[in-house]
Amino acid sequence: MSVLGSEFKVAIADIVIRLFSDSEIELEDGYVPFLVDANAVVDIQAECFIGLPQLNFDSLKLLFEARNDDQRFYCIYDAPEGYCFVLYDQQLKDEVQQIAFLNAEFDYWKIYSRNAMALKYPMGPIMMHYLTLYTDAVLMHASCAFDGEKARMFSGFSGAGKSTISGIWAREGAQIINDDRLLIRKKEGAFWVYNTPMYYVDSSKKAVLNAIYLIKHSPVNVMKNLSGALAVSRVMAFCIQNNFDRSFIDRRLQFFSDLCGATPVAELGFVPDKEVVAFIKENEF
Amino acid sequence: MDINTLSKIKLNFVAREVGDELVVVPLSGNVAQMNELFTLNETGKFIWENVVEGRSVDELAVLMTECFEIDKATAERDLDAFLVKMDLLEKYNR
């Protein structure tokens, strides 16, 4: 069930976000397991308003547009002290759903919404993406299984088998951190993998990342280790990002260079049955 | 691709060293094209980093002979092969 209130604290990847408003705001149920104690030390503030401000689009410089052939999802503009996000309603298409401002330090949001749903899609995922610029982190299209000893991340193109291989590990008793979107954060000398709030309810989870597999379906189980620039380029391709600023890209390159230097990376062709679990354990690094 | 064109279009890429290699991310309208990033080996990295405005193929070939202990003919051959591969980046010439 969603929750109503004028102030919430949620922790995503151990980063505490305080959402607050003069009005009552609503958090969708996917965020509820990520709520933390009122005494938690805040990293990022998100001031929420109901009602949209007037924007003069002619005076704004467009930095980035997320769209497909049918519709715009959101646009990012240069704002005097950071960035301005204009989010479009996914059903009503060109109707503006929310307008948000983020400062240049990535730690203060002002979110203006048509209704009380402050983190209505895609506002929530956008905020999660910018957590990765607030701290040393990346957001990935990937799944991750933790078998109590090792956390293994599986990434690949759409249809490569991320959910399939997660399901196999789950049936073998592993905890699935998430099977679609993960946040990897460098913290205290280790690379941690976290789940993030989804449209469904799932508890907040994390583990130290031990291995990265770039997967595809194959007639036989086969593994090939990758290293150096090739590993960096192959893993980075599955990062979720708004790379409209060279400094963002440079930070990503540094992060993935460090990640792939510290964490084994391999290509994995797999047959979708439980034998792949033993195959991985027998052949990994 | 000629060496002068390459020196100009390098502005449309972000590159980072990984060991002896280089990861190169193309930008299109300032937005990274993550599905088109590529890597360069040690020789490619040397050439990429030493292609600068005003430097000729001949001068770069001499630099390569000093760095890799190869003769000039080999350096020129490697350089030609590299520049031919760089034709793939022509779309970033704008």
Image (cartoon, rainbow, N blue to C red):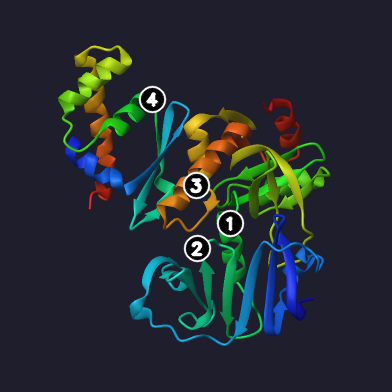
> How far apart, in angstroms, are the residues tagged by discs 1 and 4?
33 Å
Discs 3, 2 touching: Cβ within 8 Å: no
Left or right of A244 in this view: A171: right
Q: Where is residue A195 in the image (x, y as percent from the top left)?
A: 70, 55
Task: Tell me the chain of label 2.
Answer: A
In this view of the protein, which residue sits in the foreground, A272 or B7?
A: B7
Closer mark to the observer between disc 4 and disc 3: 3
Where's residue A219, x and y in %?
A: 61, 35
Q: In the rendered structure, find residue B42 and report the number of the disc placed on it.
A: 4
Instruction: Determine crowd level at label 1: few under 14, some 14-19, many 20+ residues with C-alpha closer than 10 A.
Output: some
Q: Which of A43 and B87 is in front in this view?
A: A43
First of labels 3, 2 by sequence position? 2
In percent of width and height, residue A179 lies at: 68, 53
Q: Which of A14 and A165 is in front in this view?
A: A14
Question: Can you identify the residue that label 2 sits on?
Answer: A104
Secondary structure at badge 4 equals helix
User: Mark 2: which secondary structure?
Assistant: loop
Q: Which amino acid does label 2 sit on?
A: Ala
Which residue shows up at 69% across the image and 26% down it?
A283
Kindly identify which residue carries mark 1.
A134
Q: Distance between the residues labelled 4 and 3?
A: 22 Å
